[in-house]
Image (cartoon, grey):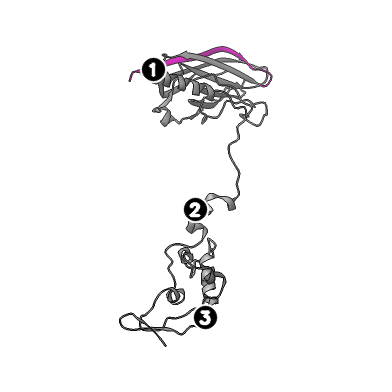
Amino acid sequence: MPVTIIKETVEVLSITTDDDGNAFLQKRINLQEGMAHQLIQTDLFEDAYLVDNNNTVLCEFAISPYPVVPTDMPFFTNPAKYKNRYPSAGDDSILFKANTRIGGSYAAGLQQFPSLQIAANQELEFYTDHLYINIHIMGDADSTYENFAWSFMFTLKNKKVPVMTHSIGVLAESHDAMCALLMSNGHMISKANLRGNTFPMWRYGGIVPEHMVNTIGTGSFFLEINTLDSELMQTAAQVRATIADARTMTAFDEPQGARFPEWILMGLNQGLVSGPVRDNWPPLKYYNNGNTRMF
């Protein structure tokens, strides 16, 4: 796969901001048509310090397949005039983004996405036949700043793709570039509603499959303890208490105690749950061959 290295500069002698203190710069880089492009390396460098009479200027840089449209979301809430930042770096329309504070006594202190480590070996793929450098400068309203100069370097891998794949890719990227002026995709929830309170189950409480039937109580009702001895009978109240115990959940910070598994409820007829178990019949006795005899 051929590799293309693109070096580009953005140099402006003077920049004048608008009434809100914003100034926007764009530069288009044409790429080979009909290809899938992988942006595997991105770098930028401040060639000259911005002269602004010791005032701080905020800048954000965005690399994208299409021009980036400013949103209605603030970059910095104080002062409120910085209210039209670019989309977030995690947006699908952004390939690379960096923020910095420059001017006066400040040198470039970049915060970028992807990070330095990932940006040196990323594999973001796009199909559009051009690349845009977008720069947003935020300073004082109706002010002029001088000596703005930045250099950029991009390393791209290009591969030939079918026309249909390329066309669908370009269409998808053009749709991603349609700016969402206001984004809100996070949801506040209380501690009691956190998903971690219900999964895994042992953190929340409840019946665990490892707990078996108590052989002294309910086990003697469902199982034949000994073929030569009488079967130990349970009263209706005891059976109901056992079934209710199997349905009872315990809090996450309390011990499980003597609980019964949920499968003990399977196959229980309605009488065991809501009515009498049975009359006090005579106990059963068995011959050695297993036949039943009745006293």
Spot occupied by residue 116 in the image (x, y as percentages of width and height): 43, 30
Spot occupied by residue 142 in the image (x, y as percentages of width and height): 67, 17
**Numbered-mark total:** 3
What's the residue type where badge 1 is placed? Ile
Dot placed on the residue nearer the N-terminal end, 3 or 2: 2
What's the residue type where badge 3 is placed? Asp
Q: Are marks 3 and 1 in contact (CB under 8 Å)?
A: no
* Residue 249 falls in image quadrant: bottom right
C-alpha gap between disc 2 and disc 1: 49 Å
Spot occupied by residue 285 in the image (x, y as percentages of width and height): 39, 84
Read off the residue under disc 2. Answer: 199
Residue depth check, mark 2 versus mark 1: number of the one nearer the observer:
2
Depth check: give the residue in front, 214 or 231. Answer: 231
Magenta-highlighted residues: 1-20
Q: Is residue 230 above or below residue 152?
A: below
C-alpha gap between disc 3 and disc 2: 44 Å
In the rendered image, the quadrant that contains the C terminus is bottom left
Read off the residue under disc 1. Answer: 5
- SS majority, magenta: strand
Read off the residue under disc 3. Answer: 279
Q: Is residue 184 above or below residue 205?
A: above
Dot placed on the residue nearer the N-terminal end, 2 or 1: 1
The magenta stretch spans residue 255 = no
- Among all residues in the image, which is located at the extreme right? 19
C-alpha gap between disc 3 and disc 1: 92 Å
